[in-house]
Image: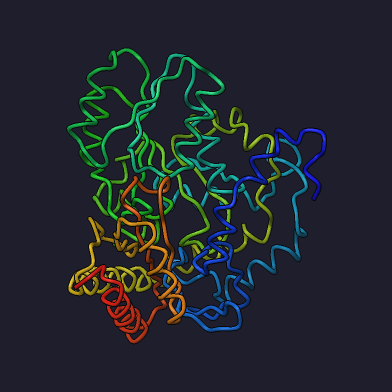
Amino acid sequence: MNNAIAGASMLQKCFDWTDAAAARASGVYPFFRPIQEARGSKVIIEGRELLMAGSNNYLGLAGDPRMKERAIAAISHYGTSCSGSRFMNGTLALHEELEARLAVFVGKESALCFTTGYQTNLGAISALVGKGDHVISDKFNHASIMDGIFMTTGLNRTVTTHRYKHNSMADLEAVLARIPRDEHKLIVTDGVFSMEGDIVDLPSVRRLADQYNAALYLDEAHAIGVVGATGRGTTEHHGDPALADLIMCTFSKSFGSIGGFVAGDHAVIDYIKHFARPLIFSASMPPANLGAVMAALDIIDAEPDRVTRLQAIARKMIAGFSSLGFNVGTAVTPIVPLVIGDNDLTFLFWKNMFERGVYVNPVISPAVPPNRSLIRTSYMAIHTDAELDQILQIAGEEGRKIGIID
């Protein structure tokens, strides 16, 4: 393309940026690798079969025949698209049926579905927080939470954002203590943190929220289907469904679909429904994805052993990597980071694992703090013990080869 065009000065940064090209040329570029076929716990990439150890399909439902059948049935009945936003012509009876089931599933009065989990956080947070309000966020919260906060501050510059040290109740209390009690406050936290694989100290956050008159918004994207005796998430894990005022989750992980929802008191959800710009100005979640989530709810209820199997896998892999000498941080879930710290070693380890037939995810700043680059491994309930042992063996061999473990 000829960059000597009108507006070239605006676009010049695109032509000047060569980081991705250099990584491709060196053979360590890990991103946008097309999956040609999915075969349960394995995928085909570039004509090769690899063990998938980097998926968020925690319960292994994305390829389940029952999910496909319900998605096809929904298309047959409703077509391929709603062709409108929820606010206008895009609400189907299936949306409301699913929302009623989700509210019961997480123990809330009401729920509201968005087209993606990302839009759920953008829409719900920006609708709730207004002039003069305060948002208090864990520093390791997901980017979609931060973007929801940024959208809020962009819409209303009198909103104040506070960030506290990861899972530090002392730092959270110090932040809350500095805010006048009569000013509105929303604490936002992940339930399971997507890079660390640890769980929020939710009872302590709830205690502080009550003490300092704050509302509590809980992002359960990586928690529902993963923690809790029946996969109901962080509130079930801690034994109290009332620990969060609002519960958000995406459908692109344990539910094997795409979309998201937020649940809470009826009046709060009705308010979000009428003020969330990403809901009002986006086409609604399509029928196939709604049908798939309905099937996922049925399967989670009928097959609780999927959740217990996933939790057993988490314990096995955390113990296995730790015994090999890897730094797994504070992980207690099937998200198991291998903290390396050096970007070049992280990409080299990813490349070696990929060439040995194991797919994992390299993560560097800004997705994680500087000098905390890591390999994010994550597991599905459908992994066999033999596959898990193979992953551990290859990781140990490649880790020793490049000197990241002894």
- The residue closer to the viewer here, 202 or 16, is 16
Q: Where is residue 28 in the image (x, y as percent from the top left)?
A: 49, 66
Specify whether residue 163 is in view. yes
Report the coloring of the rendering: rainbow
> Which residue: 70% across, 33% down?
10
Q: Where is residue 132 in the image (x, y as percent from the top left)?
A: 43, 14
Q: Where is residue 108 in the image (x, y as percent from the top left)?
A: 42, 43
> Which residue: 27% across, 41% down?
166
> Which residue: 29% across, 73% down?
399
Specify whether residue 301 is in view. no
- The residue closer to the viewer here, 345 or 88, is 345
Q: How many marks?
A: 0
Image quarter hosting the C terminus: bottom left
Q: In this view, does 2 lie above or below 294?
A: above
- The residue closer to the viewer here, 387 or 352, is 352
Q: Position of residue 353 (x, y in %)?
A: 41, 75
Q: Is residue 107 left or right of residue 44?
A: left
Q: In this view, does 379 lie above or below 236?
A: below
Please identify the residue farthest to the bottom as the structure is shown: 386
Q: In which quarter of the image is residue 86?
A: top right
Q: In this view, does 12 lie above or below 383?
A: above
> Which residue: 32% across, 59% down?
227
Q: In this view, does 190 lie to the left or right of 403?
A: right
Q: Is residue 284 left or right of residue 315?
A: right
